[in-house]
Image (tube, rainbow, N blue to C red):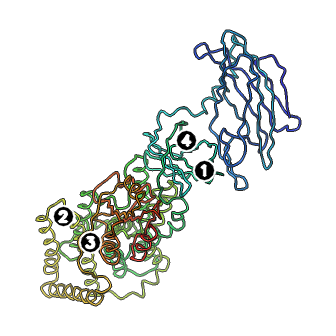
Amino acid sequence: MLLTSLSARADTGWLQAPEHPPVQVRLVQNGPLNNTSGQYAALLQVRLADDWKTYWRSPGEGGLAPRMEWQDSTNVQALDWRWPLPDRFHLLGIETQGYQQDVNFPLFITPADAGRPATFNATLTLPSCTTICVLTEYSLSLPLDANLVLDETTNHYFQQALSQVPRPASRVQAEDGRWDNTREQVAVTLSNPEGWQDPTVFIDDTDTAVFSQPELRLAGERLEARFTVNSWDPELNLDGERLTVTVADANLAEELNVPVIKGALSAGGSDQPSLLLALGYALLGGLILNIMPCVLPVLGLKLNSLLLGQRSRAEVRRPLLLSAAGIMLSFWGLAAFMLALTWSGAQLGWGIQFQQPGFIGFMLAVTALFSLNLFGLFEIQLPGRLSTWLATHPKGGGSHLMQGMFATLLATPCSAPFLGTAVAAALASSPLILIAIFTGLGLGMALPWLLLALFPGFVRFMPKPGPWMVKVKWLFGLMLLATSLWLLSLLAPTLGNSLSLVLATLLVVLPLAGLLRRHGARALLFGVAGISLAGALLGGVALLTQERWVSPAKPELAWQPLDTVRIEQEVAAGNRVFVDITADWCITCQANKIGVIQRDPVYSALQQTDVVLMRGDWTQPNAEITDYLRAHGRAGIPFNQVFGPGLPAGRELEVLLTSDRVLAALEAAQ
């Protein structure tokens, strides 16, 4: 189909093919010749009716880019066609990039001789599609008037279209471009000092490669866009190529060229846990927090208070619901705090708070004071007026709400190992998913409180109040005391051995003094005997099961600092690399070390000559390790990975290591 415009004006008028009426096109000159640039400005306008679409310069998996043949023009040297930012469309499993309804393309036409008349003659080939595709040709003829008076309406549309064209990058910078031929993926890492909100990223198609809609990962100022590459060429190699990347965000649309080098990419996309799985981990993790030594005392004391009070359904249900609300409010507050830090570009990770001595010291003070209070060393007396107000206003729920918040605070040191999976998914996802996962954590932790509130009759089946409740308080105090001693061990490098030893002695002696002061010598002897008996029982169990967990002491393995560049070099040289990201405050990391890494057969396997050991110590803040974890979609530790000729992209291991899984990964990496 060929349509011809015979107009001699600076406007071709609207052209429409009788065989294809849903599409109309027009070419109009915008103002006179620009004497500074030596160019004419023109506007190619396209109207698309109903659901018809046309394509961008890189149409995607299907379709054809519009093109213009202008060689028959008179006194025209060059054409600069500007492309507004496209949209993505999906139809029948095919992904395309283009425009729907009306679209205006700014054109800049350069005459060969600005002093001579020029006429722009071109054949526009315009594809348009719905569930079918039509290829239509339009013949355009536009005499260019060097003295044309600027039309305000035309200029408005021209400037509007020009504002939608991505500009050369000035704010966005390319940090990395990586081509993984094994996964057939390209990852580009971009930085924006103003941060990201809801970015969109495109890569221009090449002669042999088409780039799908990317998976995006946001981390403060950094954005990683990972594209799956589709190609008909089985020998496709993008190593050394420079790809044209277009990125758009709020008040931002820029283009830049990104050089790409060959390199392994971590597992991503479908290899990550689904949202439902992450929510399941969050719910389970929150539920198990209730039996941690930091939190169980709060739940136990709440039940004690219910046993000592009235047992009507309303009086049982209301305090529990308020405490559950306090837990939920706390987790929502944590989610808001995480979002604020993410948007500010701060480094985030599950457990990163233990890199701050101030935070550890605060939690040590809270758990120690709570423990000493349970042992009877002191009691907190409320002011008389406040006590009177609480007695005369039994419906006040502030104290119950605060109990739930306090339980959440105490849960921080006792974060279960599997919480890292849920929180990693949250920190690497959208704000909505982050809030959903923290809601799951809160619901899991609040679940026992909610169940008792829904079925308050269960309280009636609990033992009646009696002396046993005092002994339970001692047990809860012992749990918190153990937590305090662990927190103190984390502070030892900061405080020094001498001061740490003094504080540890006080933490042991003061509870015994509390028992003596509050309950006399008999209670003290009972407490010491109980602790000794518990220690003996634990020692007996350990002795009987030592074959399962004890191995002769072995020297520390020859670890080298984490070096991502060297990982690729070692793999290229035919070696295997075992990566261990750990920290002194990470209990699960230490369990993996003692129970798997430092024991045969894994210990011997890691000493083979072709195995290189790399360790990232995250005990103190380290931006390089944080970036490494983010690049692999993780926000917490432990994190272990195996690379090798057989696993050039690496294999991530489970949070809780097993000898069989580690050995299988090392064998697969050969």
Q: Which residue is mark 3?
A: 483
Residue flagged by tag 3: what amino acid is it? Answer: Thr
Give the answer, above or below, for where 215 lies relative to 318: above
Q: Position of residue 235 (x, y in %)?
A: 59, 52
Q: Position of residue 236 (x, y in %)?
A: 59, 50
Gap in angstroms between the C-alphas marked 3 and 4 = 53 Å
Category of crowding for the residue at label 2, using alpha-carbon neighbours closer than 10 angstroms: few (below 14), some (14–19), many (at least 20): some
Residue at the spot 16% in from the left edge and 75% down from the top edge: 508
Instruction: Say which of marks 2 and 4 sits in front.
Output: 4
Residue at the spot 30% in from the left edge and 70% down from the top edge: 590
Q: Quadrant of the C terminus?
A: bottom left
Dot 3 or dot 1: first in sequence order is: 1
Q: Quadrant of residue 607?
A: bottom left
Where residue 492 is drawn, which disc sits there? 2
Instruction: Say which of marks 3 and 1 sits in front.
Output: 1
- Kindly tell me whether residue 445 is visible in this rendering: no
Gap in angstroms between the C-alphas marked 1 and 2 = 49 Å
